[in-house]
Image: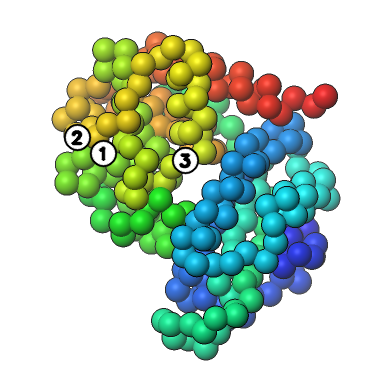
């Protein structure tokens, strides 16, 4: 496997990171995961724009332009013959003696490589169970940073409970999942948490809001309580890798009829159609 490392394509075995890299020691960096379908990136521009936005929020100056990075990533999937899968990329602030503070002028460390991604077709058709957990993360969840320890802890609790995801609650309000955004359907209206500092404004989330408007599906960006979550007609979660995933059980309780709802299925269909339009080879 070829890895894009600081502007060069190298074998994975040749990719070495210093022990005092600030990403390794502090989680001082940002990342993205981008889906590839039919040998074509899906929503590449949007992901790269968010990477630059996250970097700017932590005052990390990236050593390339958006256009340069897009070109390199396209070459990366060609070199690795990625037809269906994903690309993981991250940038850290660089290497420096271990102190919380840092001097200006550090050289960022960049890496990107292919990820195997299996489309969860069966789960998308049948729905998944999830648990809820307190949202104890920091208050800048809008930055896609490498600081994912609490996400890992909550996701592990879900795994140990044989659940697909953990939906997080801050002060009794649904924010998002550990790796997903959350949507609740009640009386044919779709609700999701506003894009504030308390959630990551997912790329799939953004695209779905556009599709809601296009298809005339009423929606509101509004805070939802745990009680409203559990009494919803339908619930679905979204992410780059899960796409649109129906949630049929939360904390052992059926949502609606305990099967994927009608509106959720329509959203899935619209999203899959958009993927096909965007990634079909000409």
Question: Which residue lies at the image location 46% right of the left edge and 60% below the top edge?
Answer: 57
Q: Quadrant of residue 224?
A: top left
Q: Marks 3 and 2, Cα distance to the nearest angstrom?
A: 21 Å
Is mark 1 in CB contact (under 8 Å) with mark 2? yes
Residue 248 x %, y %: 33, 24
160 in relation to 209, above or below: below
| Residue depicted at x 32% and y 48% | 198
Is the C terminus in the top left, top right, bottom left or bottom right quadrant? top right
Q: Earlier in the sequence, mark 3 or mark 2?
A: 3
- Residue at image mark 2: 226
Q: Residue furthest bottom?
A: 97
Q: Is residue 19 above or below residue 250?
A: below
Is label 2 in a helix, a strand or a loop?
Answer: helix
Judge left or right: residue 69 versus residue 122: right
Q: Is residue 213 left or right of residue 13?
A: left
**Residue at mark 1 to residue at mark 2: CA–CA distance:** 6 Å
Q: Give the image location of residue 114, x and y in percent.
A: 69, 50
Secondary structure of the residue carrying tag 1 is: strand
Q: Earlier in the sequence, mark 1 or mark 2?
A: 1
- Crowdedness of circle 1 by 10 Å Cα count: few (<14), some, many (20+)? many
Q: Which circle marks residue 174 in the picture?
A: 1
> Are the residues tagged 3 and 2 within 8 Å (C-beta)?
no
Coloring scheme of the render?
Answer: rainbow
Which residue in the structure is indicated by mark 3? 202
Q: Residue 233, position in %: x, y?
A: 27, 17
């Amino acid at each position: 496997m070829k890895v894009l490392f600081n502007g060069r394509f190298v074998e994975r075995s040749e990719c070495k990171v210093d022990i005092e890299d600030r990403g390794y020691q502090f989680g001082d960096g940002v990342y993205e995961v981008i889906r590839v379908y039919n040998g074509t990136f899906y929503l590449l521009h949007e992901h790269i724009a968010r990477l630059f936005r996250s970097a700017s929020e932590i005052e990390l100056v990236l050593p390339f332009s958006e256009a340069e990075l897009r070109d390199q990533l396209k070459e990366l999937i060609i070199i690795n013959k990625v037809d269906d899968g994903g690309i993981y990329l991250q940038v850290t602030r660089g290497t420096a003696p271990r102190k919380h503070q840092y001097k200006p002028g550090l050289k960022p460390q960049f890496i990107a490589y292919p990820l195997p991604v299996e489309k969860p077709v069966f789960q998308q058709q049948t729905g998944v169970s999830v648990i809820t957990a307190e949202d104890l993360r920091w208050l800048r969840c809008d930055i896609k940073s490498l600081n994912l320890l609490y996400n890992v802890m909550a996701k592990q609790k879900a795994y140990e409970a044989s659940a697909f995801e953990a939906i997080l609650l801050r002060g009794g309000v649904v924010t998002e999942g550990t790796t997903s955004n959350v949507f609740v359907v009640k009386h044919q209206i779709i609700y999701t948490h506003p894009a504030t500092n308390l959630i990551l404004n997912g790329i799939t989330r953004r695209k779905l809001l556009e599709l809601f408007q296009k298809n005339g599906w009423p929606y509101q960006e509004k805070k939802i309580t745990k009680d409203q979550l559990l009494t919803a007609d339908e619930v679905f979660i979204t992410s780059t890798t899960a796409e649109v995933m129906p949630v049929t059980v939360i904390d052992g309780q059926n949502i609606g009829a305990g099967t994927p709802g009608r509106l959720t299925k329509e959203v899935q269909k619209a999203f899959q159609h958009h993927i096909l339009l965007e990634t079909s080879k000409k």
